Image (cartoon, grey):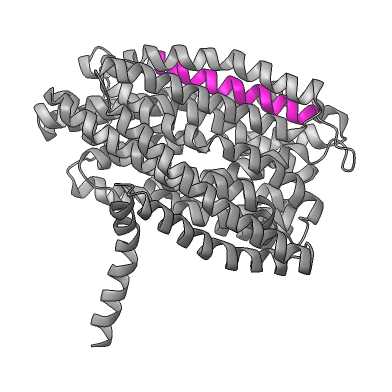
Amino acid sequence: MSRVTGLIREIVMARLFGAGLVNDAFMLGFRIPNLTRDLFAEGALSSAFVPIFTEYLTTRGRKEAAALSNLVSTAIIILVGIVCGLGMVFAPALVDLLAPGFHHIPGKFELAVKMTQIMFPFLLLVALAAQAMGVLNACGIFGVPALASTMFNIGSVAVGLLLGFWAGPHIGLAPIEGMGYGVVLGGALQLVWQLPSLYRSGFRFRPAFDWADAGLRRIITLMGPAILGNAAVQINLVVNTNLAASLVDPVRGADGPVSWLGYAFRFMQLPLGLFGVAMATATLPSISRSAAEGNFNEFRQTLSRSLATVFLLTVPSSVGLVVLGQSIIGAIYQGGRFELYDTRQTADALSYFAIGLLGYAGVKLLTPAFYALNDALTPMLISLASVLINYEVATTLTGRFGFGQSGLALSTAAVALFSFVVQFTILRAKLAGIYGRALVASLWKVTVAAVAMGVLVSGVNALVLGRFGMTRAAFLAVLALAIPSGILVFYAVAKRLAIPELEPAVRALAAPVAGRLRRGRDTIH
C-alpha cells in the first residue's frame, strides 16, 4: 500500500511540475535529507537497533527493552536534531556539492537551497518513525508500521496541495514550496500513526540520558561500521547526482536529467518495497531471534526461504520493467507537464535500473543478516569497494559512451549486483552454507519462466504500440493485455518447472484478496 500511495504522490508531482527546473530543484532538496535518512535513520540505525532491541526483549524482558528504547529515542532527538540544524544552515554548500551544474540555470540553485532548508526537518521525524517501526516489528506487530509510509504519502500530498495551491496564493507560498512543507508534515504523520500501537505495547517515551549504558553503546558501536558502509552508498548517490546535474540533454539542455533519473529510481522503489524491503522487514526479527538463541540451522532456513522468494518475485519484475518500461511510464506519468519525451527518457533509465532489482532486494535482505550476527564490518568493506566500481562505471558510461542518465542507472544496477554476489558468497561461508545449490537451481528456473514471459509481453507491446502509436491510451492497453497474460505464462512455466516457492508466494499474495472477499460475503449475509 505504501508503495502504491508513493507512486500516486509521484504521479501528482509529474503532472503538476513535469521534469524541468522546478522539479529538479525539488528532487534535489528532497534527496539531501534522504541521503542522511538512509545513512542514519532507515539504514544504520534500524540495522543496529533491531537486533539489540530484539535480544533485550527476548532475554531480559519488556521493561529493560523499553528503557533501551527510551535511551535511543533521546539520543536520536539530540543528535539528529543537531544534524538537521546544521543541514539547514549549510544547505547552500550541500547543494553546491551535489549539483554544481545548477548554478548555470538562473534561479535553479537558489530554489534547490530553499527546498533543502524546508525539507531537512523531515530527517528527525523519519528517524523516530524508523525506530518506532523497529520496536513494533520486534514485538511481532507489522500491520501498523507497514502503513506508516502510506500515512506519509497521503499526508505529504494532501498537505502539500492544500498549502501550495489553496493557501499558497494568500500567504505568498509557491506551489512547490507548499509540497516541500507537505513532506515535513507527512513525516510527522508517519510517526504519530505508530504511537498508539507503541503505547498499547507498553512503550511510552520518557527522556533518558545515560551515554554509558551498555545496550546504547553496543548499538552505537554497531552503527559505526554500518554508517561507513551506508556512507559508501550515499557517496555513490552523490556522484551520480553530481553527474546527472551536469548532463546536457540535446533537446532539454540542463533541465530534465535529474528528474528523469529521479522518477525512474522512485518507480523502482515500488517492486523493491513490495518484495525486497518487505521481505527484509519480516525476516530481520526472526533471524535476530535465531541468532540470539544460537539456533543457526533455523537462521539458515529462514534466510534461504526469504532469498528464494525474493528471486521468484524480482526476476520477472526486472524482465517486465525492461520490456514494458516505456508503456509503464507513459501510462502512469504522461500527461500535464510530463510529455512523451520525458516518458522515453525516464523509461530508458528505468530499464537499466531494473537490471539490478535482484541485487537491490538481495542486499536489503543480506545486510541485516550480517548485523544480526554482530558483523557490521563485512557489509562496510563491500560497500566501500562499490564506490570505486560505481565511479568507474558511471564516468565511463556517461563520459566516454554518452549514455546520459541511463548510464548512471546502469552503474547503480552493476553495483547492486556486485554487492549482492559478494555478500552472499561471504555469508554462505560464514554460516557453512545457505542451501546454495537449491537457491541456484531456483534462480535458474525462475529465469527461464521470466524469459518466456518476457517474449510474450514484448510481442504484445510491439503489436499494440505499432498499431495505435505512442499515446497514453495505447500504453494503458499494453498494460491491460500484457500484464495478465505475462503473469499467466510465468505461472504456467514456473509450475511446470516445479519451483517450490511458487505456491506459498501465490497463497501469500492471494490471502488479502480472499480475506476481503470473505468479509464482503459476510457483510452481505
Front in this rendered view, residue 308 or 500: 500
User: Can residue 225 be found in the magenta stretch?
Assistant: yes
For the point 76% across and 55% down, the residue is 338
Q: Which residues are magenta?
A: 224-246
Snapshot quadrant of residue 60: top left
Q: Is residue 385 left or right of residue 335?
A: left
On-image quarter of the N terminus: bottom left
Residue 381 shows in this picture: yes
**In the rendered image, the vertical position of residue 206 relative to residue 519, given as above or below:** above
Front in this rendered view, residue 325 or 251: 325
Residue 156 shows in this picture: no
Which residue is farthest left? 60
Q: Position of residue 29 (x, y in %)?
A: 65, 36
User: Can residue 32 be found in the magenta stretch?
Assistant: no
Front in this rendered view, residue 110 or 291: 291
Q: Is residue 221 left or right of residue 93?
A: left
**In the rendered image, the vertical position of residue 484 relative to residue 382, given as above or below:** below
**In the rendered image, the vertical position of residue 291 relative to residue 162, given as above or below:** above
**In the rendered image, the vertical position of residue 425 relative to residue 447, given as above or below:** above
For the point 39% across and 41% down, the residue is 310
Q: Is residue 228 left or right of residue 525?
A: right
Q: Position of residue 502 (x, y in %)?
A: 33, 51
Q: Position of residue 219 (x, y in %)?
A: 30, 19
On-image quarter of the C terminus: bottom left
